[in-house]
Every structure is written in C-alpha cells, then in structure tokens.
Amino acid sequence: MNADEQEFITNALRTCQDVQNRFYSERIKVGDINPEEPWWLSKVSLIAKNAELFLENKAEQAHWPAEFKNHDKDRA
C-alpha cells in the first residue's frame, strides 16, 4: 500500500469513527436506549472494520457484501 492509499484509508476510518461517536453521543443525549442500531450504522461499522484490516495488512480478511461491489461493468 502506498502512502496515498494509507492516508485515504486512515481518513475513511476516522470518518467512520466520527459518525459512530456522533450517533451514540446523540442517542445518549436524547435518552434513546434502544439497543437496535439503524441499518446505515452497521454499514459504517463494516467500513471501519475493513479499513482497520487494510491498515493492519490483513486485507484478505475484509468482507465486502454485494452492495459494496463495483457494478460499473453492469452499467455499460
């Protein structure tokens, strides 16, 4: 992984962590104790987990569901 890729992945991880922290902070602020997370937060968490794996040189362990796959070839 080159320096630009590492910087991009690190920034993506930080952004995911910011979104997660903001969500939980707001949830606490309004007194929402619902243990169920919204569907989109699970996507953010998955991206964060995969970013960590890439930064640890464990990209082969990353899991990308179909909605994250590149479908450009299908649009032609």
Image (cartoon, helix red, strand yellow):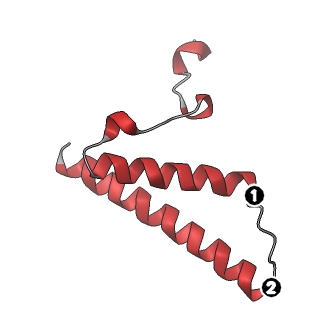
61 sits to left or right of 37: left
Residue that mark 2 sits on: 30
CB-based contact (under 8 Å), mark 1 and mark 2 = no
Where residue 45 appears, as percent x and y from the top left, is 56, 55
Residue 3 picture location, percent across and down: 18, 51
Quarter of the figure with the C terminus = top right
Above/below status of 50 relative to 33: above
Question: Going 58% across and 68% down the picture, which residue do you hit?
Answer: 20
Label whose residue precedes the other's in the sequence (1 or 2): 2
Which amino acid is tagged 2?
A: Val
Check disc 1 and report the residue beneath it.
38
Instruction: Classify mark 2: residues with Cα within 10 Å, few (<14), some (14-19) or many (20+).
Output: few
At mark 1, the secondary structure is loop
Amino acid type of the residue tagged 1 in the rendering: Pro
Mark 1 surroundings within 10 Å by alpha-carbon count, few (fewer than 14), some (14 through 19), many (20 or more): few
Q: Residue at x 76, y 67 (%)?
A: 35
Count of numbered circles on the image: 2
Q: Quadrant of residue 10?
A: bottom left
